[in-house]
Image (cartoon, grey):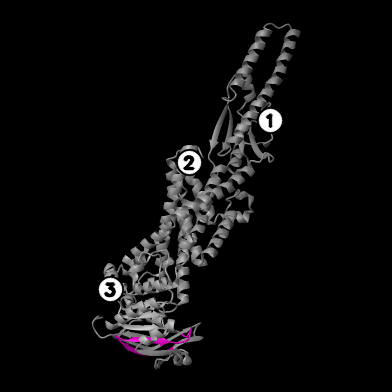
């Protein structure tokens, strides 16, 4: 028992000695990953690329002016978006927005145009999923523009009214015209109040920034292992054999090293979180509306990521147990992580990949790590992804133990 | 096992092969030795000396045979846990943690030792080996001689009666060899047993009995001070 404790102490000691170098290496890796994801983000914001928006219109059949309004909005040229409108029944529209087939729904109440003319204040409801707020801003602006166009046409109607009053010598032409103008102005002024916004939560719907942050953190945990090659490659065989005959078998040696590695990783992560905390106080929090909206919550978020950290530690340890030398291990770790990241949708949406690979992705450790990190950002850690992560961590550690045992017994 | 009793080691018909029997490394190895002796095992590179010592240290399992220490079979499973307190093994490759100091490495092996580490460093075998001179040096910065002396110091932590050394003097300077030789003489004079696989003339001269391991067979060898005579027989 004492040997176990002393061996664990010494493993911690040798890893602690390398801590300053690991922190420096980590900061460089963070810069590299942040730069990569910033470039990804910029490329998706390219003004030369128009974003396609699919809008569902839910309105009563025969509702006047709806087709005219759609035409009016469609004619507005935007350098950023191209809009496609579809008239749908409400249930169908709800189903499609949940499946991500349309971005926004406009729910037009019955007799909406007539209600404006009568001076009633019925609401147009715009329903959108999380992450679509920029689209909604755009559509509200276009809606106002369309409404202005509507007013201009209505003005034409007013002038027609004047001709009509003059021809038929009707009284109160000025008063009626004034009342009508006032009514229209009131409606335009209340337009934004005449629109009700409903945000619905759709599973797996996160903003691009959240996705990039979660992917960056997970990739960092995995690629961090490149700095640990010296510490994780197997110790000399004579040492391992002597430990075994001192009642510290090969699997136990692997477990103790894993524990020491995980604790050192946690300490390094805490130091990096402290640096992030200071930066967030200075620069402001990066993601309002998530757990990172307050600096203190950064630590809660960090603590919730520890299962991913442990799984990554187990994966890294397995890689170095297999490779047996630090350079081979570092190269294998880099390539394996890159491949996993490409297949798991870390750099682009999973939808871009063929369906068969999408199905494969949902069995990969990086996919579950990113989804779990996103759920932590959303303040509701996903137990399903957590189970996958713990399963993978145990699996990698188990394989590392088995590999060491088989390799050493084969040698003897 | 009574530490004060006369020590006796008996190897009975030990066999070991590799590659599923295709390469027979040890064939019916038989040897008898007593406490207070130093037994030398000579042989060409790759003849099986290290394999024999590994089996005696409990690192490898033989295909068949027995190893009796004062009548107790060391190869039985129940003896494996206590083996390090009976048999100390110094392999060719120093079994040390490279990133740590000599003191840290000694701490690992002495944590369950009946001996006091501090006392051994002051006046015990560790002092004889000259280890206090480089106690705070990291293993990665040590010379070969320092590592070998430290290896010996670690292997005697459990105060074994039998010490197995695999080419302890290889590539060492004269001062280191002097340290090791002095220590081995002291160890032997206390009634303990040494088995040493060696090519070094000074270590051969230290031995009371010599054996030659050739083609898997262990046979006695006479030494009359002429190392060249031995070389011809390898």
Subunit of label 2? A
Q: Quadrant of residue A46?
A: top right
* Image-quadrant location for residue A136: top right
- Magenta stretch, main secondary structure, is strand
Of residues A278 and A365, the one drawn nearer to the viewer in this rendering:
A278
Residue A168 point in image, percent of width and height? 74, 8
* Helix, strand or loop under label 2: helix
Image height of B81 relative to A301, above or below: below
- A116 lies above or below A294: above
- Are the residues flagged by discs 2 and 1 in contact, CB closer than 8 Å? no
Residue assigned mark 3: B124
Q: Would you name the residue on which mark 1 appears?
A: A73
Q: CA distance from mark 2 to mark 3?
A: 56 Å
Q: Residue at x 76, y 8 (%)?
A: A167
Report how far apart the C-alphas of labels 2 and 1 lie in the structure.
43 Å
Residue farthest front in this picture:
B175
Residue hosting label 2: A279
Name the chain letter of the residue that bears numbered label 3.
B
Q: Residue furthest right?
A: A167
Mark toward the viewer: 2 or 3: 3
Tell which circle, 2 or 1, labels the residue nearer the N-terminal end.
Answer: 1
The x and y percentages for residue A232 are 46, 63
Q: Is residue A61 visible in this depiction of the protein?
A: yes
First to last magenta residue range: B27-47
């Amino acid at each position: 028992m004492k040997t176990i404790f002393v061996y664990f102490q010494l493993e911690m000691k040798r890893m602690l000695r390398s801590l300053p170098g690991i922190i420096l290496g980590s900061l460089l890796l963070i810069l590299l990953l942040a730069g990569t994801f910033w470039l990804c983000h910029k490329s998706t914001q390219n003004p030369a690329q128009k974003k396609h928006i699919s809008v569902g219109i839910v309105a009563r059949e025969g509702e006047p002016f709806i087709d005219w309004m759609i035409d009016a909005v469609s004619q507005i040229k935007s350098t950023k978006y191209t809009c496609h409108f579809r008239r749908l029944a409400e249930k169908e529209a709800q189903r499609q927005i949940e499946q991500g087939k349309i971005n926004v729904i406009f729910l037009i109440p019955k007799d909406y145009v007539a209600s404006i003319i009568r001076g009633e204040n019925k609401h147009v409801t715009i329903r959108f999923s999380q992450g679509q707020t920029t689209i909604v801003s755009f559509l509200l602006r276009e809606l106002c523009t369309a409404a202005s166009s509507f007013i201009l046409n209505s003005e034409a109607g007013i002038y027609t009214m004047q001709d009509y009053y003059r021809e038929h010598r009707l009284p109160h032409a000025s008063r009626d015209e004034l009342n009508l103008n006032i009514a229209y102005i009131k409606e335009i002024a209340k337009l934004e109040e005449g629109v009700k916004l409903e945000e619905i939560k759709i599973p797996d719907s996160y903003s691009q920034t959240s996705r990039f942050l979660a992917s960056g953190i997970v990739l960092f945990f995995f690629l961090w292992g490149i700095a640990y090659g010296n510490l994780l490659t197997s110790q000399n065989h004579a040492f391992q054999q002597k430990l075994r005959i001192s009642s510290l078998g090969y699997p136990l040696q692997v477990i103790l090293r894993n524990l020491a590695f995980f604790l050192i990783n946690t300490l390094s992560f805490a130091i990096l979180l402290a640096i992030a905390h200071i930066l967030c106080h200075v620069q402001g929090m990066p993601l309002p509306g998530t757990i990172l909206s307050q600096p203190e919550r950064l630590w809660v978020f960090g603590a919730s990521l520890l299962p991913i950290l442990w799984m990554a530690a187990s994966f890294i340890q397995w890689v170095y147990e297999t490779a047996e030398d630090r350079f081979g291990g570092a190269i294998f770790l880099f390539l394996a992580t890159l491949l996993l990241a490409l297949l798991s949708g870390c750099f682009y949406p999973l939808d871009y990949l063929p369906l068969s690979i999408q199905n494969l992705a949902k069995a990969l450790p990086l996919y579950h790590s990113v989804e779990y990190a996103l759920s932590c950002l959303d303040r509701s850690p996903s137990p399903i992804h957590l189970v996958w992560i713990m399963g993978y961590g145990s699996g990698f550690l188990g394989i590392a133990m088995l590999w060491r045992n088989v390799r050493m017994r084969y040698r003897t | 096992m009574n530490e004060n009793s006369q020590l006796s080691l008996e190897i009975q018909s030990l066999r070991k092969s590799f590659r599923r029997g295709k390469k027979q490394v040890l064939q019916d190895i038989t040897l008898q030795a007593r406490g207070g002796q130093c037994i030398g095992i000579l042989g060409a590179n790759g003849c099986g000396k290290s394999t024999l010592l590994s089996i005696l240290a409990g690192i490898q399992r033989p295909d068949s045979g027995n190893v009796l220490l004062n009548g107790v079979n060391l190869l039985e499973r129940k003896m494996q846990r206590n083996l390090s307190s009976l048999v100390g093994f110094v392999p060719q490759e120093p079994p040390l943690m490279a990133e740590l100091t000599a003191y840290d490495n000694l701490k690992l092996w002495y944590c369950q030792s009946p001996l006091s580490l501090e006392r051994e460093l002051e006046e015990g075998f560790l002092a004889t080996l000259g280890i206090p001179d480089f106690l705070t040096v990291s293993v990665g910065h040590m010379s070969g001689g320092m590592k070998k002396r430290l290896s010996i110091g670690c292997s005697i932590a459990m105060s074994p009666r039998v010490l197995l050394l695999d080419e302890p003097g290889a590539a060492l300077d004269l001062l280191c060899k002097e340290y090791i030789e002095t220590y081995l003489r002291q160890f032997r004079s206390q009634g303990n047993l040494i088995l040493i696989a060696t090519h070094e003339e000074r270590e051969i001269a230290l031995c009371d009995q010599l054996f030659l391991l050739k083609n898997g067979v262990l046979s006695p060898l006479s030494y009359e001070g002429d190392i060249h005579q031995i070389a011809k027989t390898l």
